Amino acid sequence: MKKIWESTRDKEVSKTASEAILKGLSEEGGLFVMRDLEQAHLDVEKMLDMSYQEIAISILRILLDDFSDEEIAMCVNKAYDHRFRDAAITPLTLIGDDAILELFGGPTSAFKDIGLSLLPQLMSTALKKSQSDDDILILTATSGDTGKAALEGFKDADRIKIIVFYPFGKVSAVQQAQMQTQEGKNLAVCALRGNFDDAQNGIKQLFVDESFKKSLKQRHIALSSANSINIGRLIPQMVYYFYAYIELVRKHKIKMGEAINFVVPTGNFGNILAGYYAKLLGLPVHKFIVAANNNNVLYDFINTGVYDRNRDFLKTISPSMDILISSNLERLLYYLSDKDNKLVKELMEQLKEQGRYEVSKALLEKIQEHFSAGYATDKETSDTIKKVYEKYGYLLDTHTAVAYRVMQKKKEEGYMHVVLSTASPYKFTQSVYASLYGKTHEDEFLLMEKLHQKTKAEIPLNLSELNKKAILHDKCIDKKDMKQYILETLEEIK
Ligand SMILES: *Cc1c(COP(=O)(O)O)cnc(C)c1O
């Protein structure tokens, strides 16, 4: 077996894809990367008559070195089925001169569904390949969206259990209902008194708690996470960049070989990095445009070369992008520094110790060759939702509206632009409704119905039927009781 995955921070680490998927993060803290990624060239023209699933299979074959073709096909076909609203999986819509790639048609109406539908399949398959007989327990803290997408993805997965913690009273009514009504034999959801950081820190402590891990070991269980730095979540996201490109060719909007721009609402840098990976494999892309909200750390970095997280954390109407540390940026630094593991390690240590680092002028120029960046304020975002709706009758969610506004600011003549749309407008109904018709304090479910009556935009079934479903998980605990809760819950879930 070739072991082609190394760590961004240590060249000597070498793993197969299935080992990297099961581990998630390398032991010394680095992320798993494939050194010779750009040598594996994909023929985009051959994809012209491929379905989404076929494109996925051809990409996964290159990156998952120890998976058989049959295993890959099985994983892909199980992940992307009728649970996605559209047979295209990520449909492309044309608006004016631009295109919008809708990534939110999955089982929980979140863009996270794309990665979290395939990751469990890949993990189950990787488990079969491993020498260990242990089952896996996934522990996840969520500020809202990731938890639900992970629960739905891992529901009834072979040899894997999942427990999700969310901060009590800190997620939206819709998100809470999504989690409390989750069905499945191998899972549990629990509210935690405190905020998201409390939940996240609680879990981080458990990952290094030797007595806890020993108790799990006695039950033949190993810990893992469904975090967005796992290559099993990142690789599936490369697929829709190829799909969008092929769709534009099929719709006669571009010629095969013509370079285009992608505009990506960015938080942890996973989505946009998957696009850069697609470019490394041969997709004709001119620029990736990073779209940020007022938490514009990345905007500053791409313009100045200084990454500085020492600033206030701002709450915005695009909460999934309220992030000050974009973990996946580490992988970009690795590739653009000509795979200089030592440099990456140094920069990441500076980030940890001083909250800041600066890259050389040469490295900054390389970054700017492929990336540009813009940001939008909450006011601009709201105005954009209203203007786009009035002009085209198309409803944007707040995250997509950030990207749309940034596209307007950074648009380059002569290039087709694709805006990645990461959420259904009904996932952020309060803000979307307020942007169009002014503030109200009505119940979120009533407001969904009202927004639908006014705009006629379809409400995804998985959201509209939520308040009719039975509540199955209503526990709320203190952080200090997490360990005991997990050990007790493991007796109940299969
Ligand atoms: C997670 C998320 C993002 C950010 O994606 P990254 O891969 O973290 O950059 C943007 N929008 C929505 C709605 C999300 O859920």
Image (spheres, helix red, strand yellow):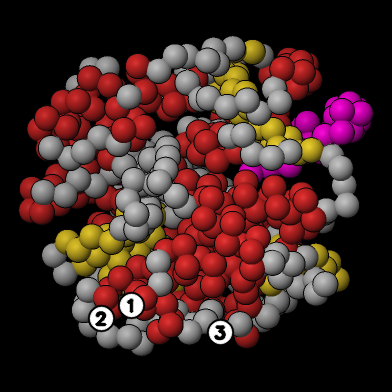
Q: Is residue 398 left or right of residue 80?
A: left
Q: Which mark is residue 254?
A: 2
Q: Identity of the amino acid at label 3?
A: His
Circles 1 and 2, Cβ within 8 Å, touching? The answer is yes
Image point 36% across, 23% down: which residue?
466
Q: Give coordinates of residue 186: x percent, y percent.
A: 66, 28
Q: Give coordinates of residue 303: x percent, y percent.
A: 44, 69
Q: Give coordinates of residue 444: x percent, y percent.
A: 29, 22
Which residues are drawn in magenta? 204-226
Image point 60% across, 38% down: which residue?
154
Q: Secondary structure at mark 2?
A: loop
Q: Which residue is mark 3?
A: 41
Classify mark 2: residues with Cα within 10 Å, few (<14), some (14-19) or many (20+).
Answer: some
Classify mark 1: residues with Cα within 10 Å, few (<14), some (14-19) or many (20+).
Answer: many
Classify mark 3: residues with Cα within 10 Å, few (<14), some (14-19) or many (20+).
Answer: some
Q: Secondary structure at mark 1?
A: strand
Label 3 CB sits under 8 Å from any ligand 1 atom: no
Observer able to see residue 428: no
Q: Identity of the amino acid at label 1?
A: Ile
Q: Which mark is residue 260?
A: 1
Query: Mark 1 or mark 2, which is nearer to you?
Result: 2
Residue 139 found in image quarter: top right
Label 1 CB sits under 8 Å from any ligand 1 atom: no
Residue 290 found in image quarter: bottom left
Cα distance in 3D space between marks 1 and 2: 8 Å
Cα distance in 3D space between marks 2 and 3: 21 Å
Q: Sequence-wise, which precedes: disc 1 or disc 2?
A: 2
Q: Nearer the viewer, residue 201 or 150?
A: 150
Q: Identity of the amino acid at label 2?
A: Ile
Q: Is residue 125 above or below residue 139?
A: below
Q: Sequence-wise, which precedes: disc 3 or disc 1?
A: 3
Image point 70% across, 60% down: which residue?
31
